[in-house]
Amino acid sequence: MLHIQRFVFNFASENTYILYNDSKNAWIIDPGNMNEQETHVISNFITENKLNIQKILLTHAHIDHVLGLQWAFDTYKVPVILHKDDQEVLDMLSASGARFGFQVPPVAVETTYVNEGDELDLDGEKFKIYHVPGHSPGSVVYHNDERKFMISGDVLFEGSIGRTDLYKGNYEQLIDGIKTKLFILDDETQVFSGHGNSTTIGFEKQHNPFLK
């Protein structure tokens, strides 16, 4: 059985997730912990549940989703998974921090790139990769068809979509990606977003004002 634990971290109320199974194998998704207190919370959860972290997944590399990335990589020494088109966003981390008024050192991590249509496997649980740019150039969604849920990052929110006024954002591209790649999925598919509450594909088809 799969379990999803959500943590709300940092100045942007970003959702960091830990995905794990009954065998205690786990992935960290979008580590956004930015201070000792937040790091203590996620570290304690991993320790207390005796989780074996196998991968660190990024939906995209905006600053609020990677503030804990160096800690996670240094602590668990596992590959960081992202789309190659967001490598440049990750490389801009220090400059992004300066715009928010705080110092963030550049990250030094081992990266592995995923592409549209790739699959990741957690002990037989398959996650298909959808490349849905527009919020960032390399935004991806991790979708488990059998369990009917996805980790969407900042592509799709409850009643909203990711902002498209950031570096290499593109409104039309984002809308098209959501409609052609996500809205063709089962209406019952749960959407675990990068901020805010979870939602479903069916609800967003009916109620999201950006996607009418």
Image (cartoon, helix red, strand yellow):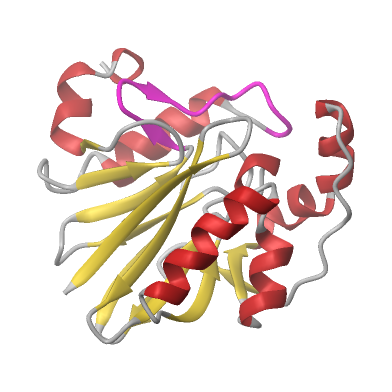
Residue segment shown in magenta? 155-168
**Placement of 209 over or under 169, stated as above or below:** above
Residue 199 horizontal side relative to residue 161, left or right: left
Which residue corresponds to the image point at 66% horizontal and 21% vertical from the top-left? Answer: 165
38 or 93: which is nearer to us?
A: 38
Image spot of residue 121 (x, y percent): 35, 81
Residue 79 picture quarter: bottom right
Give the main secondary structure of the magenta stretch.
loop
Q: Is residue 93 visible?
A: yes
Q: Is residue 115 visible?
A: no
Count of number-bearing discs: 0
Which residue corresponds to the image point at 40% horizontal and 46% vertical from the top-left? Answer: 152
Image spot of residue 20 (x, y percent): 32, 72
**Placement of 59 over or under 57, stated as above or below:** above
**Placement of 137 over or under 59, stated as above or below:** above
Residue 27 picture quarter: bottom left
Quadrant location of the C terminus in the rendered image: top left
Quadrant location of the N terminus in the rendered image: bottom left
Which residue corresponds to the image point at 86% horizontal and 35% vertical from the top-left? Answer: 102
102 or 130: which is nearer to us?
A: 102
Which residue corresponds to the image point at 59% horizontal and 25% vertical from the top-left? Answer: 164
22 or 63: which is nearer to us?
A: 22
Q: Residue furthest top?
A: 209
Image spot of residue 98 (x, y percent): 89, 33
Image spot of residue 124 (x, y percent): 25, 85
Q: Is-magenta flag for residue 148?
A: no
**Placement of 97 over or under 105, stated as above or below:** above
Q: Is-magenta flag for residue 157?
A: yes
